[in-house]
Amino acid sequence: MSLLELAGVRAAYNGITVLHGVDLSVAAGQVVALLGPNGAGKTTVLKVASGVHPPSGGRLLLGGRDATGIRPGDLARAGVCLVPEGRGVFPNLSVRDNLLMMTFTGRTREEIEESAYARFPVLGRRRTQHAGTLSGGEQQMLALARGLATDPAVLLLDELSMGLAPLVVAELYERVAGIARQGVAVLVVEQFATAVLKIADHAAVLVRGRVQWQGHPDSSLHAELSSYYLGSAT
């Protein structure tokens, strides 16, 4: 069974429809890559999936149950975690204090830190350092560690690679693959396909608010991507 499913989802801003009947599902232990050019509606898919933006049509299903219209806080408590674009760490706080904020989940500071430093040892070495002085990759690791402190069943990632060197991106996505292997359903939005397709089990290409292609990310997808991104595919 899919942990997360969007069924015929439509969404709009100020009366202008940006998603036109999106069908997408993510199973436990699966990494699904949502690809597409700028303005395709990828981030809106994540906003609908996390409850941040209400759909104007269709349904959001969580573990097979209708979760359409549920508030973001309630979806988060049900196991949906969104790590938005831009990292969003608190730059003037230490790594430890950034993690401390996640004790609202009911886990102790010690539990959260132990989990974070086990996944990302560099954060343990930087624990007293201000987050704003970390490298871009380390800040992204901190953002991931904070999200994972909620012990999510569904992890939503928006443009994990933005502004990072390819080697750092490859390392981050290896960590994401490891998270999926623990049974988490992972939906990743990426503009740069090569960054995520090495670990993805399934891929979908969103163009102008519609899923134009989805399936296993094999060589046929790589051949098609340039036409989708350049707008020549129909």
Image: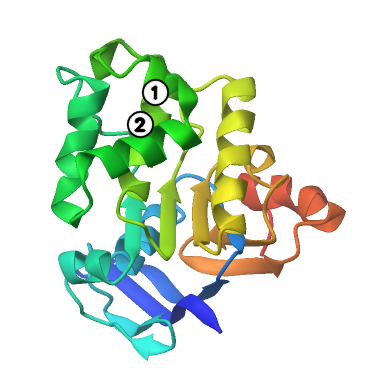
Q: What residue would you read off at disc 2?
A: 142
Amino acid at the residue labelled 1:
Leu
Residue 27: image quadrant is bottom right
Residue 163 is at least partly visible in this image: no
Name of the residue lying farthest toward the bottom: 65
Q: Considering only vertical position in the picture, is 126 above or below 17?
A: above
Q: Residues within 10 Å of mark 2 (few under 14, many from 20)?
A: many
Disc number placed over residue 123 in the picture, else none: 1
Identify residue type, mark 2. Answer: Leu
**Residue 229, percent across and down?**
62, 47
- Picture coordinates of residue 54, whole percent (x, y): 23, 72
Question: In this orientation, does residue 119 appear?
Answer: yes
Which label was assigned to residue 45?
Answer: none
Residue 16, placed above or below residue 66: above
| N-terminal label among 2 and 1 | 1
| Number of residue marks | 2
Q: Quadrant of the C terminus?
A: bottom right
Which residue is at a point 54% across and 42% down the rendered structure image? 191
Assign a secondary structure to mark 1: helix
Q: Residue at x 69, y 60 (%)?
A: 201
User: Residue 233: percent from the left, percent from the top?
Assistant: 69, 58
Q: Nearer the viewer, residue 223 or 185?
A: 185
Measure the C-alpha gap from mark 2 to mark 1.
Answer: 7 Å
Is residue 202 found left or right of 183 in the rendered image? Answer: right
Give the residue drawn at x 64%, y 37%.
Answer: 195
Which residue is depicted at the point 20% across and 77% down?
70
Q: Which label lies toward us, 2 or 1?
A: 1
Coloration mode: rainbow
| Tag 2 secondary structure | helix
Q: Residue 194: image x %, image y %?
A: 69, 39
Q: Is residue 38 above or below residue 19?
A: above
Are discs 2 and 1 less than 8 Å apart at CB? yes
